[in-house]
Image (cartoon, rainbow, N blue to C red):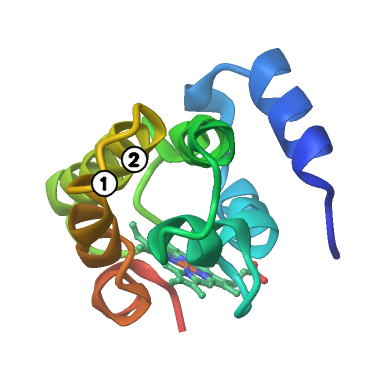
Amino acid sequence: MKKSIQSILASIAIFSPAAVSAADIGDIMTSVMKGETSLYNRVAKGKASDAEAKRLATTLKGLEGTKAPKGDQAAWDRKVGALVKAAESVGSGNRQGLMALQNAGNCKACHSGHKPD
Ligand code: HEC
């Protein structure tokens, strides 16, 4: 199921972060993380505009306050926080934030701890 970024953003605006379920984490992944040309990839490679980086940060904020689908809740909160903060940093024109975003966005590092099999 593929959702447009607009529909994800709309659902984030309507529901509080606490209402975001694990299924929505998957939706956010599919809409901004997945694939070579994903918004995340373009932002992390420094190929996106500040506005796009801000849009990434806003979408990733939907992960804040969600229950870890698997693994330690505090570790999940930390990883999500770092990811949002790094995207926001890039969005405010901080190119140093790119390295932080690449680290925080490490797919395997997060999936191995928090993605259910
Ligand atoms: C901060 C942690 C985190 C990071 C970083 C992360 N993911 Fe995920 N991802 C998850 C979690 C948790 C799930 C499982 C969601 C569920 O099924 O409940 C997931 C699920 C997915 C899914 C399955 C979506 C679905 O439901 O069909 C895809 C695809 C995905 N991630 C791609 C990526 C890619 C590509 C990257 C790196 C560029 C990435 N993710 C980085 C946490 C993360």
Disc 1 under 8 Å from ligand 1? The reply is no
Front residue of 96/7: it is 96
Q: Residue 69: x and y, percent?
A: 41, 58
Q: Mark 1 belongs to which amino acid?
A: Arg
- Residue at x 85%, y 65% (from the top left corner): 1
Of the two numbered discs 2 and 1 in the rendering, the one whose residue sits closer to the viewer: 1
Taking 24 as reference, is 80 left or right? left
Q: Residue 106: x and y, percent?
A: 30, 72
Q: Would you name the residue on which mark 1 appears?
A: 95
Q: Mark 2 belongs to which amino acid?
A: Val
- Residue at x 28%, y 34% (from the top left corner): 89
For label 1, count other residues whose C-alpha is less than 10 Å away and answer few (under 14), some (14-19) or many (20+).
some
Badge 1 element: loop
Q: Are marks 2 and 1 in contact (CB under 8 Å)?
A: yes
Q: Would you name the residue on which mark 2 appears?
A: 90
Q: Quadrant of the rendered structure where residue 55 is?
A: top right
Badge 2 element: helix
CA–CA distance between discs 2 and 1? 6 Å
Q: Residue 9: x and y, percent?
A: 70, 30
Measured along the vertical axis of the image, is residue 22 above or below residue 10? below
Q: Residue 87: x and y, percent?
A: 36, 41
Measured along the vertical axis of the image, is residue 52 above or below residue 13? below
Measured along the vertical axis of the image, is residue 80 above or below residue 17? below
Front residue of 48/54: it is 48
- Residue at x 49%, y 35% (from the top left corner): 50
